[in-house]
């Protein structure tokens, strides 16, 4: 497929990314990922986030990898998302792939 034919789709997440709403977010994300080969996920800087969202994104990354798809964040984690990553200990010992996905650090040099 020529590069000009590649379409990268954006999925904008809702404001509430906590355990109370994550099941609906999961279903919507799965439907979205089923219809695209490459997805960019957009998260608001001031959204409500808890560990269930981090778990969902990690599951989405695993699913995408096994299905030959690509998932990325539109910008590095910040605000409440970054805070949850810090509080959960997730930032400690991150792999290069994790750093690239969550913080947009690393990559081709």
Image: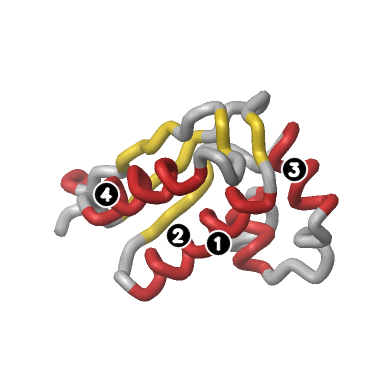
Identify the residue under disc 4. 31
Residue 103 at x, y percent in the picture? 68, 49
Identify the residue under disc 1. 58
Q: Residue at x 59, y 49 (%)?
A: 53
Which dot marks residue 82? 3
Residue 90 at x, y percent in the picture? 76, 61
* 3D distance between C-alphas at marks 1 and 3: 14 Å
- Label 1: how many Cα within 10 Å (few below 14, some 14–19, many 20+): some
* 3D distance between C-alphas at marks 1 and 2: 5 Å
Q: Disc 3 on helix, strand or loop?
A: helix
Which dot marks residue 60? 2
- Quarter where residue 47 is shown: top right
Q: Residue at x 27, y 49 (%)?
A: 31
Which is nearer the N-term, disc 1 or disc 3?
1
Which quarter of the image is occupied by the C terminus? bottom right
Cβ atoms under marks 1 and 2 closer than 8 Å: yes
- Quarter where residue 37 is shown: bottom left
User: Which of these two is toward me, 85 or 51?
Assistant: 51
Which numbered mark, 4 or 3, is in the foreground of this view? 4
């Amino acid at each position: 497929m020529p590069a000009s034919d590649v379409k990268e789709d954006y999925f904008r997440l809702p404001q509430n990314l906590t355990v109370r709403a994550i099941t609906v977010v999961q279903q919507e994300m799965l439907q979205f990922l089923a219809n695209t080969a490459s997805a960019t996920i957009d998260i608001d800087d001031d959204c409500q986030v808890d560990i269930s969202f981090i778990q969902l994104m990690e599951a989405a990354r695993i699913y995408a990898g096994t299905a030959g798809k690509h998932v990325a964040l539109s910008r590095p984690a910040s605000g409440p998302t970054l805070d949850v990553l810090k509080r959960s200990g997730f930032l400690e010992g991150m792999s290069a792939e994790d750093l690239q996905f969550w913080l947009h650090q690393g990559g081709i040099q």
